Amino acid sequence: MKYLLLIYESEASFAGMSGDEQAKIFEEYMVYTKNIKKSGNYIGGEALQAISTATTVRVKNGKTISTDGPFAETREQLGGFYLVEAKDLDEAIKLAAGIPASRNGSIEVRPIMPTPPID
Amino acid sequence: MDFERLYREERPRALATLIRLLRDFDLAEDMLQEAFAAAVEQWPLRGMPGNPCAWLVSTARYKAIDRLRRDRNFAAKQAEIAYLSETAASPDPVDETFPDDLLRLIFTCCHPALSVEAQVALTLKTLCGLSVEEIARAFLVPPPTMAQRLVRAKGKIRAAGIPYEVPSAEGLSERLDGVLRVVYLVFNEGYAATSGDALVRRELCGEAIRLGRLMLPLLPRVSEVGGLVALMLLQDSRRRARVDAAGELVTLEEQDRSLWDRGQIAEGEALAEAAVRRGGAGFYALQAAIASLHAHAVRAEETDWPQIAGLYALLLRLHPSPVVALNHAAAVAMGSKLDRGLRLIEEIEASGSLSGYHLLPAAKADILRRLGRRAEAAEAYRRALELVTLEAERRYLQRRLREVGAAPP
């Protein structure tokens, strides 16, 4: 089964860290990504730019409305994701628990809905 | 043939195996129901098969194949039918049930990815075979709400890929804690018996004990399973003495101990002792040992309070919580160290962690009453009365307040 692991953490607390601490966390992500590539679980994954760079788009009555940022102010923001292949939810949970942000932030595990292939 | 008993006994094991074979909770439940209907028809004529459980599993599985063939989406179901036929049992059903199937079902129903309410509902529905209406009545929710809860839980098991597996050794103890919590939750829902349908609630206690007994041989090396079964048996043994003819709550001290169920006590004591002996006695085993000491005292005055206080001290070290601290303080006081017990309670009071919990001033009032400090006792009883919510407990506190010579509010 495929799962999307959504990484939520506080941008403010990350920004408050020293350069060394940030470098250490980047290193941890490198190791983690390498490990799940080796185990065959990795399908994809990216880190996202800060929430201040986000744009929300809606189409109302045929008109495109773009606004700054996402809607709600939350303590934790979506900061990145992994798309993984796992045997079942238990394996997906184990993969999520390995992501560095699971210690200070949280990981949302979402199963991917199976859909017929589109040519 | 006592079909009702047979159904109760064979159902969990047969269903657990069917869910593994059919990979579908609803289909497995429906087909087992049909297989059982066939058994009621056939067994009185042809005699009971040597292995009723294997017969039920094999019959239910054939019925599942028939059902899938009749299904309008025949083409879409080809793969499933092929899979089922290929693995279908011979006319001489062999026993395909494994003890692991039952554990798989238990761990799946109590998977932490499901809400606790859903875990409880699913456990009662699949493992205990209670109807949606019965579960709804026990938890005071409308049946459609309960049905919705079950549909959503089964939907999540399917869509999120919750495995039908016994967790691996590394995660087992954590997951087992969750399972035991669900079983004890079911028991307490029945034991509290303060609202809702009394009959259904009593049934919940019985179901929780049955579930625990079911798990005992499956996890023989885990002392907490035995500890929990012992605790439930010992608490339940006092059921007839807990409430008097007028429906009033009777405290442990004042209960008519001849009403206690001696058979259950003997079984509970043996299990508690075995659990403690096995070492590493945990949360449930220690509480069972405490309940065991209470059960042992023929009269309230003979209770071994110093040993109970010692066990609470151990429990407090392992599972620090203000409620355990309160029980410890009360036990110390009962062990004729009233002053020390009072000091411990005042410490909890000062920490503020149990403000709003009526049993804190109630316990304090009890000690003050025993110390003969009537005015202070009355004040503490009044404080407890402000916080209490259960009617039976309110009447008890009012009676005590009158005893120390004050008029109840």
Image (tube, helix red, strand yellow):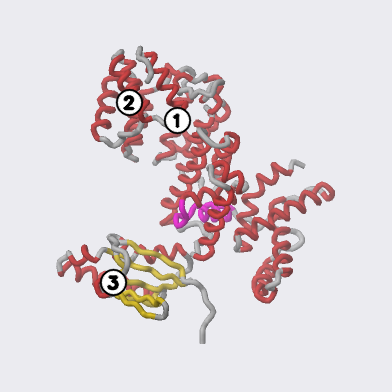
Question: Residue placed farthest to the right in the image?
Answer: B45
Confirm whether the magenta stretch covers residue B222.
no
Looking at the image, residue B37 lies above or below residue A52:
above
Placement of the C terminus of chain B among the 4 image quadrants: top left
The residue where tag 1 is placed is B390
Q: Nearer the viewer, residue A9 or B183?
A: A9
For this rendering, which residue is in front, B283 or B250?
Answer: B250
Instruction: State the extent of the magenta-drawn residues as a range.
Output: B99-115
CA–CA distance between discs 3 and 2? 52 Å
Same chain, marks 3 and 1?
no
**Callout 1: few (<14), some (14-19), or many (20+) C-alpha neighbours within 10 Å?**
few
Dot 2 crowding, Cα within 10 Å, few <14, some 14–19, many 20+: some
Mark 3 — on which chain does it sit? A
In this rendering, which labeled residue sits more in front, label 3 or label 1?
3
Is disc 1 placed on a helix, strand or loop? loop
Closer to the camera: disc 3 or disc 2? 3
Which label is found at residue B383?
2
Residue B376: percent from left, percent from top = 28, 18
Q: Is residue B56 left or right of residue A94?
A: right
Location of residue A26 with respect to B163 vertically, above or below:
below
Label 3: which secondary element: loop
In the displayed structure, does residue A118 sit left or right of residue B365? Answer: right
Inspect the image, locate mark 1, and give the three-letter code of the amino acid beneath it.
Leu
Helix, strand or loop at mark 2: helix
Q: Which residue is mark 3?
A: A69
User: Main SS type for the magenta part?
Assistant: helix
